[in-house]
Amino acid sequence: SGEIARNVITVASVAQNTASGASQTMAAATELARMAAELQQLLSRFNFDAAPARPVTGAIPVVVARLGAARPAVRGGHTNGHTHA
């Protein structure tokens, strides 16, 4: 009888831990979906060409995104071949 009670308590504890883990997994999946949607929205602002319009020669341009900026700042006076949406 005491062994049965211990087993029931163990099963109840395992069930509670499983429910807690499932809840945490659901919260993480919801946050990941939100972040994916936000990333997709941010990337939709840019138009990425399948191939460069001209061969890249010389220095590789560095694009720096700044918060609140209408367009990314381009260092080195070069453009990157991408058009801003």
Image: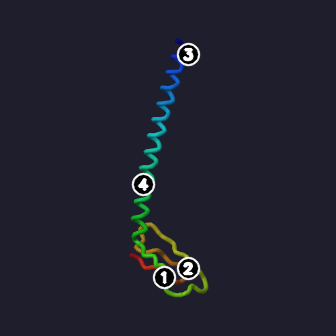
Q: Are marks 3 and 2 in contact (CB under 8 Å)?
A: no
Q: CA distance from mark 1 to mark 3?
A: 73 Å
Q: Which numbered disc covers residue 3?
A: 3
Front: mark 1 or 3: 3
Secondary element under disc 4, as helix, strand or loop, is helix
Q: Which residue is mark 1?
A: 81
Identify the residue at image location x=57%, y=85%. 56
Outermost top residue? 1
Residue 13 coordinates in the image, percent (x, y): 50, 27
Q: Badge 3: how crowded within 10 Å, few (<14), some, or many (20+)?
A: few
Front: mark 3 or 4: 3
Q: CA distance from mark 3 to mark 2?
A: 71 Å
Front: mark 3 or 2: 3
Q: CA distance from mark 2 to mark 1?
A: 10 Å
Q: CA distance from mark 4 to mark 1?
A: 31 Å
Q: Badge 4: how crowded within 10 Å, few (<14), some, or many (20+)?
A: few
Secondary element under disc 1, as helix, strand or loop, is loop
Front: mark 4 or 2: 4
What colouring does the structure picture have? rainbow
User: To which quarter of the image does residue 76 belong?
Assistant: bottom right
Q: Which residue is mark 2?
A: 61
Whether 58 is drawn above or below 69: the answer is below
Residue type at tag 3: Glu
Q: Which residue is mark 4?
A: 33
Out of 80 and 36, give the one closest to the viewer.
Answer: 36
Q: Quadrant of the C terminus?
A: bottom left
Of mark 3 and mark 2, the one earlier in the sequence is: 3
Residue 82 coordinates in the image, percent (x, y): 46, 79
Residue 7 coordinates in the image, percent (x, y): 53, 21
Q: Are marks 3 and 4 in contact (CB under 8 Å)?
A: no
Whether 44 is drawn above or below 31: the answer is below
Q: CA distance from mark 4 to mark 2?
A: 32 Å
